[in-house]
Image: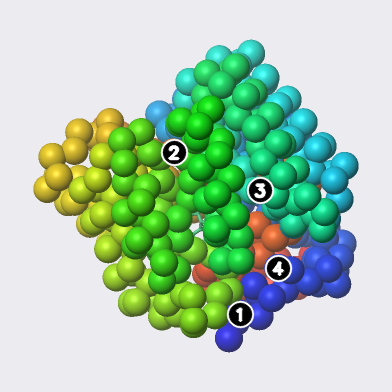
């Protein structure tokens, strides 16, 4: 119930205006977001990289209905990638992109515009010597996102894509994408989805995550294990061993601000550990999904609002 309400609120302009007006939320938002500006994203990247972790940066934004904003987001990524190149961070930091932030939902030619904007970002990443991973949004976008990824891979074969284990289709998508050179970030899934397309309970989703991991670890691609769940992390390690995978042939990923000690433990054990690091002003949707994932975050948030 609470999760559903928070996920509905994540897409409500009225609740968004109310939450954004609350000054103390900034302190709480900072737990999950590096800051409003590019230099804060770069500086947080430097700190993470100096501790042995890799990074994937997200210039926050989603669901735009404005072509100019979509183009501005692509430009912001180009600036970010130039900054990563100039600071020497591109070897350790890539970027993650939501296609809805670069035009996928525009009423006219949305997919075409998103493809062209994403192509600009991929070209900037190639120039900087790093990679791009496409985030996955709600299930109505899955076919479109995988289609755009397919087109981009013709020119940028290193392009990664996210799959969400809670979707019933995902095991089959994992099979399609478990080929050589394919980078797949497997996560549980963060949106409110109907039962017709997605598993609903934690146990069912966890089992689906393990099935997806089995396919990806047995395949020829590069699995990116995006989870904070100790069981999933343990099983991923065992599957890697059973499939005789070298530690360089897969990686672990977690969100900025969540289980940082475990991030360091995995990195110190010799694994590639990448942190998903968001920055920018459009933190609302991202932040609300983090609240929905864990009721304790909501208690923390409400307590801070009450004591402002
Ligand atoms: P689960 O939710 O079962 O949590 C396991 C444990 O992790 C919890 O018990 C708690 O200790 C900790 N934890 C999890 N979430 C927390 C939170 N918000 N705050 C504090 N602690 C928390 N989703 C999506 O739909 N599309 C996408 O593109 C992405 N991209 C993505 C990239 C990366 C790198 C990660 C790590 C995750 C995503 N996600 C995502 C989000 C993902 O789908 C999922 O919602 C969260 O990762 C939470 O699921 P867990 O696997 O961590 O397990």
Please provide percent x and percent y for residue 272.
34, 35
Nearest to the eye among marks 4 and 3: give it. Answer: 3
- For numbered disc 4, what is the local secondary structure? loop
Q: Which residue is located at x 54 percent, y 80 percent?
A: 194
> Toward the viewer: 303 or 245?
245
Picture colour scheme = rainbow
Tell me how far mark 1 sits from mark 3, CA to CA: 23 Å
Position of residue 81 relative to residue 287, above or below, is above
Camera-nearest label, 3 or 2: 3
| Quarter placement of the N terminus | bottom right
User: Are discs 2 and 1 less than 8 Å apart at CB?
Assistant: no
Per the rendering, the mark at residue 274 is 2
**Mark 4 to mark 2 CA distance (whole Å):** 26 Å
Q: Residue furthest bottom?
A: 1
Q: Which residue is mark 4?
A: 10
Q: CA distance from mark 4 to mark 3?
A: 18 Å
Other residues around mark 4 within 10 Å, as few (<14) / some (14–19) / many (≥20): many
The mark nearer the N terminus, 4 or 2, is 4
Sequence-wise, which precedes: disc 1 or disc 3? 1
Q: Which residue is mark 3?
A: 99
Per the model, the C-alpha gap separating discs 2 and 1 is 29 Å
Where does the image place residue 215, in percent across and percent down from the top left? 26, 54
Residue position marked by numbered label 1 in the rendering: 4
Do we see residue 228 in this rendering? no
Residue 256 picture location, percent across and down: 54, 46
């Amino acid at each position: 119930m609470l999760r559903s309400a928070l996920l509905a609120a994540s897409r409500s302009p009225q609740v968004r205006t109310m939450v954004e007006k609350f000054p103390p939320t900034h302190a709480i938002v900072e737990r999950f977001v590096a800051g409003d500006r590019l230099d804060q994203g770069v500086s947080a990247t430097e700190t993470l990289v100096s501790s042995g972790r890799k990074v994937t940066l997200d210039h926050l934004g989603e669901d735009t209905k404005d072509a100019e904003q979509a183009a501005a987001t692509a430009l912001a990524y180009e600036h970010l990638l130039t900054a990563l190149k100039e600071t020497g961070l591109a070897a350790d930091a890539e970027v993650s992109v939501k296609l809805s932030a670069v035009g996928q939902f525009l009423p006219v030619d949305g997919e075409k515009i998103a493809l062209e904007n994403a192509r600009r970002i991929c070209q900037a990443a190639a120039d900087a010597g790093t990679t791009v991973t496409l985030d996955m949004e709600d299930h109505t976008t899955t076919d479109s996102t995988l289609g755009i990824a397919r087109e981009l891979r013709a020119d940028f074969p290193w392009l990664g894509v996210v799959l969400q284990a809670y979707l019933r289709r995902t095991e089959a998508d994992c099979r399609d994408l478990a080929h050589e050179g394919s980078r797949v970030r497997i996560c549980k899934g963060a949106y409110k989805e109907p039962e017709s397309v997605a598993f609903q309970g934690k146990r069912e989703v966890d089992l689906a995550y393990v099935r997806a991991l089995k396919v990806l670890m047995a395949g020829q691609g590069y699995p990116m294990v995006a989870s904070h769940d100790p069981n999933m992390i343990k099983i991923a390690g065992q599957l890697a061993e059973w499939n005789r995978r070298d530690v360089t042939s897969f990686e672990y990923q977690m969100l900025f601000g969540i289980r940082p000690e475990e991030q360091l433990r995995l990195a110190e054990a010799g694994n590639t550990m990448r942190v998903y690091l968001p920055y920018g002003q459009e933190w609302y949707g991202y932040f609300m999904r983090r609240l929905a994932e864990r009721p304790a975050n909501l208690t923390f948030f409400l307590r801070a609002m009450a004591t402002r």
